[in-house]
Image: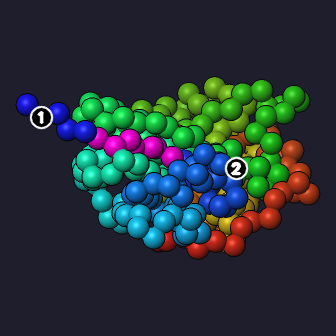
Amino acid sequence: MIKIQYGKVFLVGAGPGDPDLITVKAHRLLQKCDAVVYDSLVPSQILEVVRASCELQFVGKRRGHHSSSQVKTNSLLLELAKKHDCVVRLKGGDPFMFGRGGEEAEYLFQKGVPVEVVPGVTAGIAAPAYIGIPLTHRLCGSSVTFVTGHEEIDKARRTVNWSSLAEVSHTLVIYMGLHNIEQIVQQLIEGGMGLDTPAAVIQQATVVGQRFIRANLGDLVQESRRKMFSSPSIIVIGKIVDLQVKECSPEPANVTMPITF
């Protein structure tokens, strides 16, 4: 039996949008790789550094606009690893933070494909920083919980217990939570979180188009809908929001996203 020789797949974090936040290692890999498989939250400017001969494959997913299933993405990575020595799987933010990087790494490992992870700056850290909110502070923020709000809130067996999270940590950072924001807020309040708890929604944090609102938890749903906030957005809940220092906020980058909805 002939053993298939695979190239190496790098699971690379592209960061939260601003091309200047990509790591040096990620930049170096993009300059030398033979193929790039990228998501919808990867700005076009990052892709400009790849060689002309590099094979580009878009597999972006957004709610209601799935261009490629995870099964197809896994199969594509396997096929590219058969053809090329260096394949970059480029994901917005960090590949192991709500990005299915763990699933892809496991699949490739089981197929005998060598895999290496290159961490990236995740949106849950970058978004608050870009509007001046420190996620930790000696006076009121000694713990942070990162949680996805993407799962269907009414499914039979939810993996996120929002009522319990109401008292778990000082600060909640919620990814992909706008779609379910009403149910999330309701369950946090039912779990004992006060209506006057400070909160913020941050949209397009590190790029031009950045918007954010601050509101008490009891008003957050109404305010986010009144001002028509949309994805990609990060929700931050906790007293830490009141410690915002706008003067330290970086300037959002002028970039072009390959696909938006």
Please name which of the two marks, 1 or 2, marks the residue nearer to the observer. Answer: 1
Question: Is residue 166 found left or right of 83 in the rendered image?
Answer: right
Q: Residues within 10 Å of mark 1 (few under 14, many from 20)?
A: few
In the rendered image, residue 11 lying in the magenta stretch gets the answer yes
Taking the spot 70% from the left edge, 36% from the top edge, the residue there is 171
**Segment colored magenta:** 6-12
In the rendered image, residue 45 lying in the magenta stretch gets the answer no
Tell which circle, 1 or 2, labels the residue nearer the N-terminal end: 1
Q: Which mark is residue 126?
A: 2
Q: Is residue 53 above or below residue 136?
A: below
Q: Position of residue 165 (x, y in %)?
A: 59, 31
Q: Position of residue 92 (x, y in %)?
A: 53, 53
Taking the spot 29% from the left edge, 41% from the top edge, the residue there is 6
Specify the amino acid type for callout 2.
Answer: Ala
Taking the spot 76% from the left edge, 55% from the top edge, the residue there is 130
Specify the amino acid type for callout 1.
Answer: Ile
Q: Which mark is residue 2?
A: 1
